[in-house]
Image (cartoon, rainbow, N blue to C red):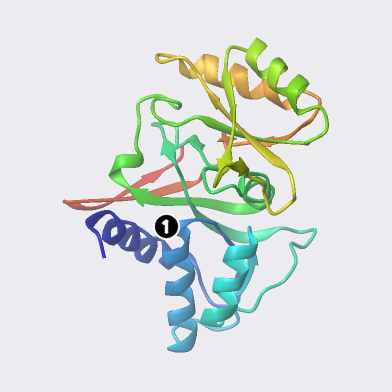
Amino acid sequence: MSEIDRLKQQAAIAAAVRVRSGMLVGLGTGSTAAHLVRELGRRLQAGELDGVRGVPTSLATAALATEVGIPLVELPAEGVDVTIDGMDEVDERLDCIKGLGGALTREKIVAAASREFVLIGDVGKRVATLCERTPVPVEVLAFGVERTAARLRALGAEPRRRLRDGTPATTDNGHLIVDCHLPLGTSAEAVRAFAAAVDAVPGVLGHGLFLGLTSRVYLAGPDGIEELVAG
């Protein structure tokens, strides 16, 4: 296991204390969230937890959760108790960018339906301002994608259609992803304005800016776990 992967695992294990017996848990997507899924599965098998069910945010997470013995359900109308997920960047407000793994829309639906939304990752994910290193993933309909990309470009972004093995990448929903690169030095206020503007673009199904949703963050580094709490 690499050092970065070990830190991701430490953050996941630390955050697992947020899950108690009987809870309905939103299960994130990606390499960091996978550590959380495995840890919850281990605790269920060991009898440390009981009655925990999961709502997966991707087909890959659903497959892993089934493999480690976490019962799965559809997202109910009343939402979930807690969601634990990784992130690509997180700032001092605990706002984050997610979606480099391609599950951004499902992740946001579950995050917004959570009583508590918890992020986990290594300290390298922390930034002063969002979009320092990571583009904003945007899930879009294939129909009219060139027009949608032009609208995103008019908002100040450089949209690039995501490819996988040389062909357009698609989400579990069957839609395309356009990664929007914002200019270096874009302010937090400008990022928020961009998020609101993207929401209004026809053809956009969701974007990877998760603003005002996070309750708590666990960051693992060489000196241990740092826990950040909103508000």
> Can the viewer see residue 25 in this picture?
no
Q: Tell whether 73 sits left or right of 28.
A: right
Q: Position of residue 116 (x, y in %)?
A: 56, 53
Q: Position of residue 230 (x, y in %)?
A: 46, 40
Q: Tell whether 159 sits left or right of 47.
A: right
Which residue occupies the foreground of this view, 139 or 124?
139
Q: Tell whether 90 sits left or right of 79.
A: left
Which residue occupies the foreground of this view, 166 or 118?
166
> Can the viewer see residue 29 in this picture?
yes
Q: Quadrant of residue 77?
A: bottom right
Picture layout, residue 130 above or below residue 186: below
> Which residue is at 57% across, 65% downward?
61
Picture layout, residue 210 above or below residue 27: above
> Which residue is at 67% across, 46% downward?
170
Q: Which residue is mark 1?
A: 32
Which residue occupies the foreground of this view, 92 or 193?
193
Q: Residues within 10 Å of mark 1 (few under 14, many from 20)?
A: many
Which residue occupies the foreground of this view, 7 or 17?
7
